[in-house]
């Protein structure tokens, strides 16, 4: 044991080893020695003898682990107290409270410490300092954005002291540098769990400060995503945010660490032996594997990490395992705190701390200030405190200081185990999950302990503490003070308060208001207020109209007075309510602070508005003070056209935090649908709000009222049914005692519940009338927004107050089974509706979730087992979903990861996307027991949710739904009443109740339902007599009956049968053959005798009772048929049964059927029709007819009951009705003709039209009429009906045409301007009309049809000379009708070249003469004339026979006669235009002159022609020669011709041999690139050659050849070609092609050079937006390269964005290395000199030179800049400073030389001489210094 002591020191003085019995004695002593106890001094011999004698006297056997012992009870674990804390103690804490500038942290054993703003981390402190220095206090980062209550943090004690009131002050710090001070880079290991704070936010992640000086810890964005989404509400991390980080990778000997904050990584992190933990660097919060060394009665001793020991006290044992620990047991423990003085380690076994990163749930035990009586002592710990057990079984703890007001002499006897005491809760300890109590009498009897206990309006006593200028400070308790403001010292203002108040006086005050957050209490000493007997108003909800209360004036204005009550409740007294005679100037009568008596006229608690009066209500005056009780009614129902009760359809616009912003259809009126108003079931409301999407249409929504100037809607079925049923009370006077109505819970108060009925009526259900059960807490029974049924029990007409009852015994029908099943059906129907919405989503996960069916069996794979025993599954049908089975549903099955299992679905949570399954064998075997309807059976509860329970019939795998609640008001159940898994209950299965996904519905048997207190003495529901007689019939399907027509309605007949039975005949069951426009019911009259056959039955609701309380109160009515074919038996006579949704899906789109008009619904603008008695449909307005006249008054065109032939479109969005069409249209395909409503007319563009089926169409100008006009949109007005034809279809919208030839294809129409379907419909030379689409950089774009447009280049627009292209944009408007001539077409690219020249179109010039433009000169026109002649010649050649054309197919490749290039038609011209070979005597072809560099930034219209001299060629003579046959030549002429050819050949050879000759043809360039394959200049000139000829594709091909040909070693040459391609794509390509070339260039060249070149290309082509975006990308990617910053700065300065350039310098200095800062600043300054502010540039140079005065290179640059941009005086001053620098003589000589050169150039002889004298003086001074 001695050896053990040396290896494992436990504190105290080391003891020598002993032998024999003494050794055993020492071992026993050490066994019970508590680590961390005070070290014992070495005992003297006398003390040892006394101790031995005392031991002999008091020696008693005690129970120890393993058997009896003769030693007394061992000392217990040491408990942490404030006195034992020292600076540097490391502790684990839990955040209790977060304020803007401070954190309150709960520490072990009930201690509380505080962390201020500057103790978070260094980076956060620097950020705060910067915000304060820059006066950004409004944007100051506060702690609530970084911390939340329940966070577990590692902290260190930074300061111990006392407050001014002599209370302990404990300051903490979570700065990683202090918490992790014991760690170094060399000690870091992968797998360590440390605490850190975000120090910097980077592009791809975050830098985290972990407190290790040289270590750079990085958290990637990917690893942080899960934490941001789940723990940070989706917000990015910010500087100062506290994190628990796991070291994943350690590199460079600890200098770099990669971190992870994933929940699973952090939660499973364990401290291991290989991480070299020891007491010196051990940290709180580490989870370790430990072994129990010793078990004490109330503590444990653990060994962990091989050689460390620690203790666990009673409060930190696992509550579930107390009493089950034994020596040698393996446990998980968490380090709680480390005491540096005693070298002791304390641990905790509480499960919440064994998962790092988890949030601690703050204790929810007895509230603070509650008195607990009695509490039983559970454990007394000497010197620490007492642990008590409260009545509810929870533990509370009291420290020694709080056991008594006086010192307790024998605390062990007073607080012996089992004794009971009275105590009061004073705080909560989150680390121990228990309350802290005090037994001091002064605290137990105190009126209040904290600010929250003080209530406004309360009368309290205190002592005057001091008199200040602003009032009197009053001491209420030892730590609570209040302030009596100066205006509240008396009823009247006091001039000398010191004469009335003295320090120490006891005074009585009344509390005006309490601010618990700022800990401020405001009091009043006004005698009238303190002694007032009138009711006090402390909240707006308490301000009831007619109430009279005392208040005081806080503001006097000309329009009235503002009066304040308690709790800062304020109201306005208008001037007319100040007195009977309204005063002209209220300021002369009333004053601030005056006590007044006010009467409440009107109050709106939601808006906190209160209207008061100083006049007492008088009878007979016509003033009704209580008129404000329903004051919100007019506001609710206002004259908006949407009164309460109106049912509308709405479309979701956006989602808000507490509801949906919607628009009411079809008027698109804005409204709001709160989340709580979506359903009667509270659990379905958030699901509907989550699963509804923008643009979804919600049907059947009721207008509930108005609030905050917007319409409030409601979708609660109970309220809808009640309001639609009949008259509803709209005013208080219409209410009657005994009325039962559904309502919505509006507010919950401690004394009761306020509920709101329709039309804004509000009533109160007192606490005693809320439930048949005893109500302890009103918040446990109902929630705000819940649907309830209330019965009026009392009415106070005078005060307009209604008292209600919410008891089920008062509001229920007595048939609990029917009511519970009705609620269950409604709940399941809503789930089906939600599933329909989800099934239409694009997300595959959501779609698969909606397809899951309860009871469905799935083939799944076991994934993993969670710590709580739950097993998760994966599989293809549940991909992306959370599928789990708890321990109960795993019984009987052996599960292992990867195992294939069959599981049955029990429930699908549509909100959290969780699926609950079971693998219990009894649920998977085939069902052999058939469910018997309406028979009492046993069922096993398998799963319980808030609204239903899923059970299985005993002995069967048949599932059934069991309702949890029997009524809307049945929301509270005791634990004994709640269902639980595995419980066997008695149920009554409803016959034929396969209601939801084939699952049976069951009602709980009466034997299992407790009768409420209010039901005692009443008859059971079964014994209640029937309220109304119901006639039951015994008719069966197929029976033939006779009867008399009882009533005739448009869509049905009612038949009176024998026995008092009434039958129902739908209009579809009257005739076999129905002709159009026929009304079948018109063939019968009342009293006619008919013979019918029973084909089924239906339930008809009775309207004698409320639908919510008697939802199952229905009458079964036989359904009959009068159709002869069914009466004779030829056709089946049974009704189709099954789910309505399935029956609707059986109708196929396009199917024709007969329907019958029910009514035209003008609000929805649709026609309601009936197909059968239970299948209804809608026909929207645009599908009623193609006749405009019919659409003007559709209600007149369709008669109720009229038979119509309709086409099926499909089920509507709700899945309960059919969408039909009367026009035969079921889908909008190309060619479909329909009606539309014009929604928007866009001048110059076209019209937007609303089409059927919720689609939108667009018609361009070319698709409006068959004959184009100057005003094509004239007569088209928004809202008017038009006939349209679909001509194209896309995802976003449809292309439509309004041409009569399209919409009336059966008629013949004269078409002046035919549609051009494609480019193939055009030919060269065609003259067509179109509309100007746009005026761009290259020319005028003309729209020829919906899908075809062409380009008119500027040289083909006008005969005038236009210098500025803006003249075109200003004088050629969009939408202008023009006539154009086709110059060229390119079928492959779809490009069309057009001309607007008067010579081509035979129309006047497009530009008016009034502009004063000059006509083009002849030489300017020549190019155009030549082109026209060529086109003319081409036209004539087309008329010639093909054989003759082929003979003359010799054409000139290049024609450089035009001053610009026609990109769209040049190639076609070359291919179509034919030339004769020119005679050498007529023209000489000029040599191709290519410039050395190609002007990439020039537009196509500015490129210089490549060929010169061809303008002299006479096209006219060629044309003449072409038409004349060549004459026969004589021999002499032939000989002369041969000689001329030889001379030409010789000249050609000479030219080819000339080395200075420039290439002229493609062959020339091919030869040139073969000789210099790696010369980029040649390749670029080759590309330019093709560009001059407008051969864009050939130029691209040359560039690609160059990249393949140039050697890979020639990087610069390849880069030049890449830049050429970038220029080409920028000018002539698309954005996509440019991006592709750029990406390839980045991959194959140095990226930064490519980025810079592309930025230059953008800048030169004036694409500044793209350039700016690219520069920002470069700054993120190449932030360490100074050239990028300089390039961007130059770009900004050129754009005139000087401020952006200034800010850019600061960003650059943060990113660039320190050594580059000086050079960067100098270069930025040079840019400022050139393009920015010269004064700022000088300031930058001066600041830099002040820090680096010996940098002569900077001086030289500065001088150069000033010489270039400054004045002569500035230059001389600067040079004079430079020659006086303290630098090397060689450098000074350089400056003198520059000075002298400058003066010689710009100065006079005197100045030159002066410079020389200065130089001489400098040389002499240097010589004297060297000599000395």
Image (spheres, grey):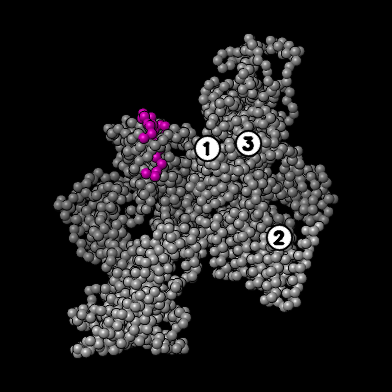
Say which residue appears at 32% left-offset and 30% top-offset: 955
Marks 3 and 1, the one that precedes in the sequence: 3
Which circle marks residue 1784 in the picture? Answer: 2
Query: Disc 2 on helix, strand or loop?
Result: loop
The percent coordinates of residue 228 (x first, y second) are 51, 47
* Among the two numbered marks 2 and 3 on one chain, the one whose residue lies closer to the N terminus: 3
Give yes or no for contact between labels 3 and 1 (Cβ–Cβ under 8 Å).
no
Query: In the image as oriented, which residue stretches furthest toward the right?
Result: 499
Front tag of 2 and 3 = 2
- Does the CB distance between marks 2 and 3 fall below 8 Å? no
> x and y percent of residue 752 in the render?
56, 44
Circle on res. 182: 3
Q: Nearer the viewer, mark 1 or mark 2?
A: 2
Q: Position of residue 71 (x, y in %)?
A: 64, 14
Label 1 neighbour load within 10 Å: few <14, some 14-19, many 20+: some
Q: Does the magenta-highlighted stretch encompass residue 895?
A: yes
1552 sits left or right of 388 in the view: left
Give 1756 or 1304, whichever is nearer the viewer: 1756
Measured Cα–Cα span from mark 2 to mark 3: 50 Å
Give yes or no for residue 1123 being in the magenta stretch. no
Q: In the picture, residue 55 is in which quadrant?
A: top right
Residue at x-position 37% and y-position 62%: 1605
Badge 3 marks a residue whose secondary structure is loop
The residue beneath circle 1 is 190
Q: Which residues are magenta?
A: 879-898
In whole angstroms, how far apart are the C-alphas of marks 3 and 1? 17 Å
Residues under labels 1 and 2: Cα distance?
55 Å
Q: Number of callouts in the render?
A: 3
């Amino acid at each position: 044991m001695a050896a053990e002591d040396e290896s494992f020191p436990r504190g105290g003085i080391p003891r020598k080893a002993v032998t024999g019995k003494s050794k055993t004695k020492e071992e026993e002593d050490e066994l019970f020695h508590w680590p961390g106890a005070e070290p014992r001094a070495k005992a003297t011999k006398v003390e040892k003898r006394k101790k031995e004698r005392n031991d002999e006297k008091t020696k008693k056997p005690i129970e120890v682990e393993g058997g009896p012992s003769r030693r007394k009870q061992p000392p217990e674990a040491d408990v942490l107290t404030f006195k034992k804390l020292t600076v540097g103690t490391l502790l684990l804490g839990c955040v209790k409270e977060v304020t803007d500038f401070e954190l309150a942290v709960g520490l072990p054993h009930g201690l509380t410490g505080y962390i201020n703003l500057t103790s978070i981390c260094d980076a956060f402190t620097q950020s705060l300092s910067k915000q304060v220095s820059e006066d950004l206090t409004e944007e100051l980062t506060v702690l609530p954005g970084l911390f939340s209550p329940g966070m577990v943090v590692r902290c260190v004690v930074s300061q111990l002291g006392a407050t001014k009131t002599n209370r302990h002050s404990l300051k903490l710090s979570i700065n990683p540098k202090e918490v992790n001070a014991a760690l170094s880079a060399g000690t870091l290991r992968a797998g360590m769990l440390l605490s850190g704070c975000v120090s910097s936010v980077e592009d791809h992640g975050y830098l985290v400060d972990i407190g290790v000086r040289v270590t750079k810890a990085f958290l990637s964005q990917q690893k942080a995503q899960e934490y941001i989404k789940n723990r940070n509400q989706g917000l990015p991390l910010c500087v100062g945010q506290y994190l628990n980080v796991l070291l994943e990778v350690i590199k460079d000997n600890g200098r770099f660490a990669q971190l992870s904050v994933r929940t699973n990584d952090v939660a499973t992190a364990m401290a291991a032996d290989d991480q070299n933990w020891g007491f010196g660097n051990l940290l709180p919060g580490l989870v370790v594997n430990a072994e129990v060394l010793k078990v004490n009665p109330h503590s444990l001793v653990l060994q962990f990490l091989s050689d460390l020991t620690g203790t666990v006290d009673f409060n930190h044992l696992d509550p579930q395992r107390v009493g089950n620990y034994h020596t040698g047991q393996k446990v998980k423990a968490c380090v709680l705190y480390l005491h540096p003085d005693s070298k002791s380690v304390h641990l905790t076994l509480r499960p919440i701390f064994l998962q790092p990163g988890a949030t601690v749930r703050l204790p929810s035990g007895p509230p603070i200030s509650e008195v607990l009586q009695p509490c039983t002592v559970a454990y007394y710990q000497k010197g620490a405190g007492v642990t008590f057990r409260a009545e509810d079984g929870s533990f509370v703890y009291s420290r020694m200081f709080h056991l008594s007001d006086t010192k307790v002499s024998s605390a062990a006897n007073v607080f012996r185990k089992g004794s009971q005491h009275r105590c009061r809760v004073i705080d909560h300890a989150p680390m121990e999950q228990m309350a802290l109590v005090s037994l001091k009498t002064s605290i137990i009897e105190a009126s209040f302990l904290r600010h929250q206990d003080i209530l406004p309006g309360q009368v309290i006593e205190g002592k005057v503490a001091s008199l200040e200028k602003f009032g009197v400070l009053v001491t209420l308790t030892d730590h609570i003070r209040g302030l009596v403001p100066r205006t509240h010292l008396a009823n009247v203002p006091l001039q000398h308060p010191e004469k009335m108040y003295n320090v120490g006086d006891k005074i009585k005050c009344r509390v005006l208001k309490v601010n618990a957050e700022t800990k401020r209490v405001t009091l009043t000493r006004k005698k009238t207020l303190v002694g007032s007997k009138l009711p006090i108003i402390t909240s707006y909800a308490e301000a009831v109209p007619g109430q009279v209360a005392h208040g005081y004036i806080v503001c006097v204005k000309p329009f009235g007075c503002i009066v304040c009550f308690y709790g800062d409740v304020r109201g306005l007294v208008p001037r007319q309510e100040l007195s009977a005679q309204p005063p002209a100037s209220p300021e002369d009568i009333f004053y601030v602070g005056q006590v007044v008596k006010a009467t409440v006229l009107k109050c709106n608690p939601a808006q906190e508005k209160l209207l008061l009066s100083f006049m007492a209500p008088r009878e007979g005056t016509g003033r009704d003070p209580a008129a404000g009780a329903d004051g919100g009614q007019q506001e609710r129902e206002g004259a908006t056209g949407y009164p309460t009760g109106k049912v509308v359809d709405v479309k979701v616009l956006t989602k808000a935090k507490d509801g949906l912003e919607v628009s009411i259809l079809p008027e698109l009126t804005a409204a709001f649908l709160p989340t709580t108003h979506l359903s009667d079931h509270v659990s379905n409301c958030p699901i509907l709000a989550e699963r509804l999407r923008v643009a979804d249409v919600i049907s059947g929504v009721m207008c509930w009222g108005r609030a905050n100037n917007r319409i409030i809607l409601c979708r609660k079925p109970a309220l809808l049914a009640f309001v639609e049923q009949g008259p509803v009370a709209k005013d208080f006077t219409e209410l009657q005692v005994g009325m039962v109505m559904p309502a919505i819970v509006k507010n919950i108060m401690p004394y009761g519940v306020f509920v709101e009925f329709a039309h804004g009526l509000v009533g109160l259900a007192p606490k005693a009338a809320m439930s048949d059960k005893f109500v302890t807490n009103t918040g446990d029974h109902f929630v705000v927004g819940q649907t309830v049924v209330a019965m009026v029990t009392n009415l106070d007409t005078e005060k307009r107050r209604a008292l209600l009852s919410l008891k089920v015994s008062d509001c229920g029908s007595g048939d609990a089974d029917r009511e519970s099943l009705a609620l269950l059906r409604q709940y399941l129907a809503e789930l089906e509706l939600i599933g329909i919405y989800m099934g239409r989503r694009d997300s595959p996960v959501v779609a698969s979730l909606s397809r899951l069916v309860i009871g469905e069996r799935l083939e799944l794979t076991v994934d993993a087992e969670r710590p709580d025993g739950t097993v998760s599954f994966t599989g293809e049908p549940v991909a992306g979903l959370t599928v789990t089975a708890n321990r109960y549903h795993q019984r009987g099955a052996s599960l292992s990861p990867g195992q294939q299992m069959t599981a049955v679905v029990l429930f699908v949570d549509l909100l959290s996307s969780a699926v609950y399954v079971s693998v219990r064998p009894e649920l998977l075997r085939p069902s052999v027991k058939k469910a018997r309807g309406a028979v009492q059976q046993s069922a096993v509860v398998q799963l319980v949710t808030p609204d239903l329970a899923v059970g299985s019939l005993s002995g069967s795998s048949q599932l059934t739904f069991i309702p949890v609640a029997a009524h809307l008001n049945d929301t509270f159940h005791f634990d004994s009443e709640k269902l639980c898994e595995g419980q066997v209950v008695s149920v009554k299965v409803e016959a034929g109740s396969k209601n939801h996904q084939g699952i049976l519905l069951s009602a709980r048997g009466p034997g299992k339902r407790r009768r409420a207190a209010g039901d005692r003495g009443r008859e059971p529901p079964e014994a209640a007599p029937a309220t109304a007689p119901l006639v039951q019939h015994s008719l069966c399907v197929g029976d033939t009956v006779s009867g008399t027509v009882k009533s005739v309605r448009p869509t049905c007949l009612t038949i009176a049968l024998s026995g008092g039975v009434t039958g129902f005949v739908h209009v579809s069951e009257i005739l076999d053959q129905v002709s159009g426009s026929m009304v079948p019911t018109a063939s019968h009259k009342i009293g006619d005798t008919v013979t019918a056959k029973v084909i089924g039955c239906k339930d008809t609701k009775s309207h004698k009772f409320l639908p919510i309380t008697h939802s199952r109160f229905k009458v079964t009515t036989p359904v009959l048929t009068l159709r002869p074919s069914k009466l004779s038996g030829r056709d089946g006579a049974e009704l189709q049964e099954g789910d309505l949704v399935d029956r609707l899906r059986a109708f196929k789109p396009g199917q024709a059927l007969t329907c019958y008009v029910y009514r035209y619904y003008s609000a929805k603008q649709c026609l309601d029709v009936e197909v059968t008695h239970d299948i209804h449909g809608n026909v929207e307005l645009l599908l009623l007819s193609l006749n405009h006249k019919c659409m003007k008054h559709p209600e007149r065109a369709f008669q109720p009951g009229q038979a119509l032939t309709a086409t099926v479109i499909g089920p509507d969005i709700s899945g309960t009705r059919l969408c039909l069409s009367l026009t035969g249209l079921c889908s909008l395909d190309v060619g479909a003709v329909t009606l539309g409503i014009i929604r928007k007319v866009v001048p110059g563009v076209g019209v937007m039209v609303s089409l059927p089926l919720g689609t939108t169409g667009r018609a361009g100008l070319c698709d409006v009429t068959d004959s184009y006009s100057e005003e094509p949109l004239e007569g088209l007005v928004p809202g008017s009906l038009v006939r349209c034809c679909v001509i194209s279809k896309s995802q976003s919208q449809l292309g439509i045409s309004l041409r009569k030839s399209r919409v009336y294809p059966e008629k013949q129409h004269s078409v002046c301007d035919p549609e051009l379907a494609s480019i193939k419909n055009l030919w060269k030379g065609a003259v067509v009309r179109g509309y100007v689409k746009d005026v761009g950089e290259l020319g005028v774009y003309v729209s020829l049809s919906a899908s075809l447009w062409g380009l008119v280049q500027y040289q083909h627009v006008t005969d005038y000379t236009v210098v500025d292209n803006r003249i075109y944009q200003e004088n050629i408007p969009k939408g202008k009708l023009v006539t154009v001539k086709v110059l060229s077409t390119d079928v492959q690219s779809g490009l069309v070249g057009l001309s607007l020249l008067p010579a081509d179109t035979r129309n006047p010039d497009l530009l008016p003469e009034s502009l004063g433009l000059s006509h083009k000169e002849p030489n300017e026109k020549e190019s155009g004339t030549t082109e026209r002649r060529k086109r003319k010649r081409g036209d004539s050649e087309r008329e010639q026979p093909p054989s003759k054309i082929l003979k003359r197919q010799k054409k000139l490749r290049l024609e450089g006669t035009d001053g610009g290039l026609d990109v769209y038609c040049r190639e076609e011209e070359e291919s179509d235009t034919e030339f004769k070979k020119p005679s050498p005597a007529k023209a000489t072809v000029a040599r191709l002159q290519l410039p050395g560099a190609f002007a990439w930034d020039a537009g196509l219209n500015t490129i210089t022609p490549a060929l010169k001299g061809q303008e002299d060629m006479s096209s006219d003579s060629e044309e003449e020669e072409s038409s004349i046959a060549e004459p026969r030549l004589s021999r002499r002429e032939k000989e002369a011709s041969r000689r001329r050819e030889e001379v030409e050949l010789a000249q050609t050879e000479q030219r080819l041999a000339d080395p200075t000759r420039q290439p002229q043809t493609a062959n020339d360039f091919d030869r040139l690139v073969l000789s210099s394959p790696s010369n980029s200049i040649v390749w670029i000139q080759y590309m330019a050659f093709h560009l001059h000829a407008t051969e864009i594709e050939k130029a691209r091909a040359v560039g690609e050849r160059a990249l393949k040909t140039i050697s890979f070693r020639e990087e610069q040459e390849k880069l030049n070609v890449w830049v050429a391609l970038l220029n080409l794509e920028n000018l002539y390509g698309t954005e996509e092609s440019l991006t592709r070339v750029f990406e390839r260039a980045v991959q194959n060249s140095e990226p930064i050079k490519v980025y810079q070149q592309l930025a230059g290309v953008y800048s030169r082509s004036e694409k500044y937006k793209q350039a700016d975006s690219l520069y920002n990308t470069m700054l993120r990617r190449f932030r360490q390269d100074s050239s990028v910053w300089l390039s961007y700065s130059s770009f900004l300065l050129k754009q005139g964005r000087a401020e952006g350039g200034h800010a850019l310098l600061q960003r650059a200095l943060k990113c660039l290395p320190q050594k580059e800062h000086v050079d960067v600043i100098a270069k930025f300054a040079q840019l400022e000199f050139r393009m920015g502010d010269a004064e700022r540039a000088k300031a930058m140079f001066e600041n830099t030179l002040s820090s680096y005065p010996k940098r002569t290179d900077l001086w030289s640059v500065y001088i150069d800049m000033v010489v270039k941009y400054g004045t002569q005086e500035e230059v001389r001053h600067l040079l004079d400073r430079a020659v006086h620098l303290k630098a090397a003589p060689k450098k000074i000589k350089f400056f003198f030389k520059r000075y002298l050169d400058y003066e010689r150039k710009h100065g006079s002889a005197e100045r030159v001489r002066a410079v020389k004298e200065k130089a001489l003086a400098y040389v002499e001074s240097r010589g004297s210094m060297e000599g000395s």
